[in-house]
Image: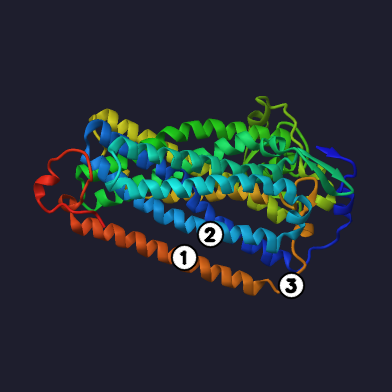
Amino acid sequence: MDRVSHPVSKALAAVGDPSQLLPAREQMAFTLGFHIILVPFGVALTALMLIAHYRGLRHGDGDALRLARRWSKVAAVLFAVGAITGTVLSFELGILWPGLMGDYGAAFGMPFAVEGLFFFLEAIFVSIYLYGWNRLPPWAHFWTGVPVVLASLGGAAAVIAANSWMNQPGGITLRDGHVTAVRPLRVFFNGAFWYETVHMLLAAYIVAGFTVAGVYAAGMLKGRRDRHHRLGFLIGFLVAAAAIPVQIFVGDTVARQVFQDEPAKFAAIELLPATGDHVPENLGGFLVDGKVRYGLPVPDMASILAGFTPSTEIKGLEAIPAEVRPTDRSVTIVHLAFDVMVGTTFLMFGLVLWFAWLWWRGRTMPTNRWFLRGAAVSGLVAVVCLESGWVVTEVGRQPWTVVGLLLTRQAVTTRGNLWPLFGATVALYAAVGIGAVLVLRGMARHWRTAGDETVYVPYGPEQPFAASGTAGEER
C-alpha cells in the first residue's frame, strides 16, 4: 500500500467515542450475527443437494432424488431470507459507517460489486434448477445446479475479500488520507484473503452438514429410522466429518498467520498483557485492569503453538500505543470467543471419531441413542462455533474498522438517536426469522404427513413410486 500521508496521526488525534457508536456497533453486530447463520446454507446446502441429486441419478436412488428435491426447496427459502438480510446490511454500511464508505469505498466496495455479480448468477440458476425438476432431462437438470454451487462459493469469497481487506488493507494509494488509486486484484487478493476464505468456506460446510445431519438424527430419535432419514443423515454428516479435520489444520495455520500479521488481535486471543516468551496458553479467564484473572494457564503452550518453540516471543498488549489499544472488555470477549470456537470444534471432531468407532464396530450406521442425541445438537454447536469465530475476527480488529487506517469511531455516522433504527431492524429480522421458521416447519410437516409413497420424483426408478398410483407433483 502506498501512503503519501498516513492518516493514523489524524486517528490518534481523535478523542472519545461519539454517542452513536454504541447503537451503530450493536446494530451491525446483530444484523451480521443473524445473516452469517444463513451464509453456510447458501454456500453448502446446495452442494449437499447436488450430492444427493448425483447419487439419485447415478444409482437410480429414489430416496436420494427425493432428498435433493426437498433440500432445493429449503435452499430456496433460505436464499430468499439471506437476500433480505444481506440487502439490509448493504444499506447499513452506508447509513451507519459513512466514514468507511466515503474514504475507502473505492477499495472496500469493489469486492461487493463482484459479490453482486455472483449473487445474480446464483439467483438465475437457482430459479432454473427449481423450475427444471419437471421440465429438463435428468442430467441437464443436474448440471443447472452446478453454477449455483460455484456462484455461492464465488459470492462468499468476494464478501470475505472485503472483510479480510479491513484486516490487512492493501492495493491502494493514499494522499492526504484519501484513496487516489486502487489496484483491484491486490485489494481482492489481499494478505488475509486466502486463509480467511478457506477457513470460512470450510466452516460453511461444517455448519450446513451438521445441521442437516442433526435434523435427521432428531427424526431418528423419534423413531423414524427409514432409509430416507439414514441417507439424509449420512450425506450431511459425512460432508461435515470430512471438513472438520481439514478445518483444524487450517485453523491452526490461520492462528499462526494472525500471530505474524495482526499482533494486536493475537495478543487479545492469548490474553497477553505484556510481551514475552514462554507464554502460557490461558484457558478461560478475564483481563481486568491489564491483568489476567481466573485463567487456567498451560505453560509455554501459546509460544509453542505460535512458533513451534517455547522461546517464541509474542507481542503483548502493552506494545500497542495506548490510543489504539483494545479495551480489557474487548480483549476478554475475543479471548473467550476463541476458546469457545476451539472447544466446539474439538467437540464436533470428537463426535466424528465416535461415529467412526461405532461404524467400525457395527459396520453400519450408528443408532446408539446417545450418539444420535449428540448428532441432533451438532448443528447448533456448529453455529455457536461459527459465531464465535466471527466475534474473534470482528471484535479482534477493534478499535479499528480498517486496521492502521480508520478507527471505528471515525467511521461511524454523525447522526444521533440510532436506537429507534436498531429497534426497527430487530423487529424486521425477527419477523423474517419467524416467517422462515414457520415456512420450513410447514414444509417439513407436509412432507411428513404426506408420506414417502405420495412424494413425486420426476425421474429415476419407476418403482415403488409410480406403483402407488397416487404420484403427483410435490407441492
Image quarter in which the C terminus is found: bottom left
Q: Position of residue 276 (x, y in %)?
A: 77, 35
**Left or right: residue 457 compared with residue 106:** left
Q: Mark 1 and mark 2 in contact (Cβ < 8 Å)? A: yes
Q: Position of residue 169 (x, y in %)?
A: 74, 41
Question: Where does label 2 land, which residue?
Answer: 85
Q: Quadrant of residue 282?
A: top right
- Name the image colouring: rainbow
Q: Which mark is residue 432?
A: 1
Q: Residue at x 56, y 32 (%)?
A: 250
Label 2, label 3: how far apart the Cα atoms are:
24 Å
Question: Where does label 3 land, which residue?
Answer: 416
Q: Nearer the viewer, mark 2 or mark 3?
A: 2
Q: Quadrant of residue 461?
A: top left
Measured along the vertical axis of the image, is residue 30 above or below residue 159? below
Q: Residues within 10 Å of mark 1 (few under 14, many from 20)?
A: some
